[in-house]
Amino acid sequence: MSNQIDRDAQGRSDASPPAGVRRPPLWSLILITALSPFALQVLVPAMPGLVDDFGSSRGVVGFSLTGYLLGMAVGQLACGPLSDRYGRRPVLFGGLVVFFVGSVFCLVATDIWPLIAGRVLQALGASAGMVLSRAIVRDLYDRERAAQMIAYITAGMIVAPMAGPVVGGYLYELFGWQSVFWFVMAFGAVVTAACIAFVHETHFDRGVTTSMGELWQGFGFLLRMRRFRGYALQVAFTTASFYSFLGGASAVTVDIFGQSASDYGWWFVMISGSYMTGNFISGRIGMRVSSDKMITLGTTLSMTFAFALLVVTLSGSLTLPVFFLLSGVMSIGNGFSMPNGFAGAVSVDPTRAGTASGLSGALQTAIGALLLTVVGYTLADSPLPVVLMMLTGSVLAWFAHRHGMRRRGGCFFCLAS
């Protein structure tokens, strides 16, 4: 059954976009993708102040992040199939409206829980840009060119989570936490203006579904496709490996190696730069090297250096430069595999590109948040839990892609079958 579905979709995987469709400039797709990760990261420096201003606890204030991740997962699940049914542009603007409503909720909040609710709404709305940028690319390009474009979008978008904490920190120190949300709304206004001017409708083949019930059945259709499972889970587990690093790297730097928080910020720039480099290289050679070869190279590179990091950690000879150097090489591998994995996921059936983008993005967020939580609960006075979770994610990403490449099917969870 899985193989038959794969063969049926394969015939549609190289569909061409309608003639005369206007292609948005690359920078506009980077902007709509960057809105969500920027809004996620920009509040982080203000969180200690929220504890004092609202008289709340660190744990409750932390829900402003976990609630945002939940909103991202749910929003991606909803926006993808809705865009397949109603078009990319209406769903994108609907998401921006929800984003602005959530931002207003945050601005006028006099208690922490309304602010958390506003953060969830922000994430629900901003997730439309993350989903639809990939779907729009797949509407306009074949699979290999789509992988190249997604790599460039990701390389540009990575500036947002790098800049978010810096911008948020300065705004909070100078003007208070409300200024963070004013700035986010201003950024959202810029994104909206870019969408109005440059992002036109690209999805016209909406005959794949006739009702909302059939629309949601698209999730089951995709999950029965071995190739989709392979790509989506590869992306999810690669992200989980990186989230594991994010969840513990600051504690490793400050608590274990005794460096300052600003020192961690500079080390993290190297990781972001490595990931950006991997995406840029992937974009440059994407038309000459197949997506599957790039995924194999990237997942193998990340898995190999994660294992090397484990060996160094167990030997007791781990230093901070070695920790970040090996993690940086892993990030280059992630830059090879991630855009190609997303391109593969949205290419198995281009008529469901939005649904595929949303489902793969939701899996990415959910599995990444799971490993992030595990790291948070297990991290103590050793970097070993972080390293183990990074290795776990890398190994599972490698097996997920192998699962998708096999000629015969296998169960959703039995990745090596």
Image (cartoon, grey):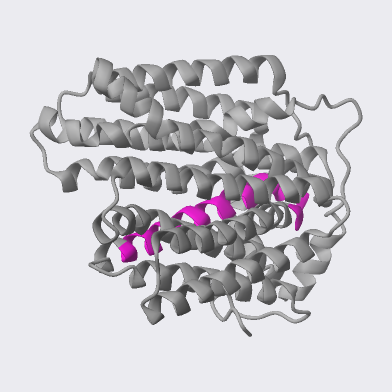
Instruction: Describe residue 333's horizontal placement relative to residue 122 as left or right.
Output: right
Residue positioned most to the bottom: 417
Residue 232 in picture, x, y percent from top left: 61, 61
Q: Is residue 86 magenta?
A: no
Relative height, residue 211 to residue 118 (above, below) = below
Quadrant location of the C terminus in the rendered image: bottom right
Residue lying at 51% horizontally and 33% vertically, measured from the top left: 160
**Residue plotted at (21% across, 24% down):** 109
Residue 70 shown left or right of residue 132 in the figure: left
For residue 17, side relative to residue 87 (left or right)? right
Q: Quadrant of residue 45?
A: top left
Of 67 and 168, the residue lying toward us: 168
**Prevailing secondary structure class for the magenta stretch in the rendered image:** helix
In the rendered image, residue 348, in percent from the top left (x then y), is placed at 75, 58
- In percent of the image, x 74 and y 25: which residue is there? 25
Closer to the camera in the image, 42 or 129: 42
Q: Position of 284 compared to 106: left or right? A: right
Visible in this render: residue 209?
A: no
In the image, the segment drawn in magenta is 347-375
Answer above or below: position of 211 versus 119.
Answer: below
Instruction: Give the residue drawn at x 78%, y 34%.
Output: 204
Residue toward you, 132 or 61: 61
* Camera sees residue 213: yes
